[in-house]
Every structure is written in C-alpha cells, then in structure tokens.
Amino acid sequence: MVTSREGMDSTISYWKQRKRKILDGPTIYAWLFCVFGMTSLFCAAFLPDIGIVFLLRAISLFVFRSVWMTRLVFFLATAAHAIEAIYAWYLAKSVDPANARSWFWQTFVLGFFSLRFLLKRARK
C-alpha cells in the first residue's frame, strides 16, 4: 500500500518531469501581438495601397514618417528576431536538446516573449 503522502509526491514529481519535456510558451495574446504586428509591418512597408493596407500604411507613416523608415524598422525587427532565434537555438542545445528546434522556431516568431521562458529554464 502507498500512503497518500507518497502518492502525492510521486504525482508531483511526474508532472514536474513531464513539464520539463514540453515546450513552454507565452499566452495567445503574445502570439497575436507578434504575428499581427510583423505581418502588418510587412504589409505597410511592401504591399500596394489596396484595402486594409491603406490603413496600415497610414498608421505606419504617422509613426515612422516615411516608407523608407517603415522598411528599415521591418528589416531591423526581422534581424532581431533571427538573432534571438539563433541564440535560443544554441542555448536550448545545452538546456533542452530535445526541443532545440522548437525553441528556435518559436523564438523566431515571438522574439523575446519566447526567449524569456528559455532563459528562465536555463537558470534552473
């Protein structure tokens, strides 16, 4: 027979081990913010003024003052996401080798929103 204390301890250790095997990630709001933000920035910088792109370009011109600056911000944001993803891949190879590829792609899409979960896991 197993006491209730031993059963609870084994259940907790099982779930901690299982959580360590899966990929942590941010909420759906971070996903929507990053995916919508990068997509709208791309549309405002490179697509012609048709439909909703007209509104996106107007907002980006209000914020960045020129299409050239909007394109520069898009390239810099894409480069930042790529550099964060490469860093996450190298870090995940030592911290969580089974999920290194997943950490790369998730960090490429989400940037720091994903990288902070990997950094938290690396501290443990």
Image (cartoon, helix red, strand yellow):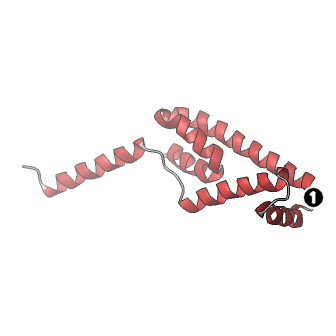
Q: Residue at x 57, y 47 (%)?
A: 119
Q: How many marks?
A: 1
Q: Nearer the viewer, residue 28 or 19?
A: 28
Q: Nearer the viewer, residue 31 or 116?
A: 31
Q: Is residue 63 left or right of residue 115?
A: right
Image location (x, y in percent) of residue 68: 92, 52
Crowdedness near tag 1: few (<14), some (14–19) or many (≥20) residues, C-alpha within 10 Å: some
Q: Nearer the viewer, residue 53 or 98?
A: 53
Q: Is residue 47 left or right of residue 112?
A: right
Which residue reaches farthest left? 1
- Residue type highlighted by circle 1: Ser
Residue at numbered disc 1: 66
Q: Which quarter of the figure has residue 48?
A: bottom right
Q: Is residue 69 left or right of residue 5?
A: right
Image location (x, y in percent) of residue 18: 35, 45
Q: Nearer the viewer, residue 5 or 60?
A: 60
Determine whether 36 is above or below 91 in the image. Answer: below
Image location (x, y in percent) of residue 99: 49, 37
Determine whether 86 is above or below 11 in the image. Answer: above
Q: Is residue 72 left or right of residue 28?
A: right
Question: Helix, strand or loop at disc 1?
Answer: loop
Which residue reaches farthest front? 50
Q: Residue at x 90, y 55 (%)?
A: 67
Image location (x, y in percent) of residue 34: 66, 55
Q: Residue at x 67, y 58 (%)?
A: 36
Q: Residue at x 81, y 45 (%)?
A: 75
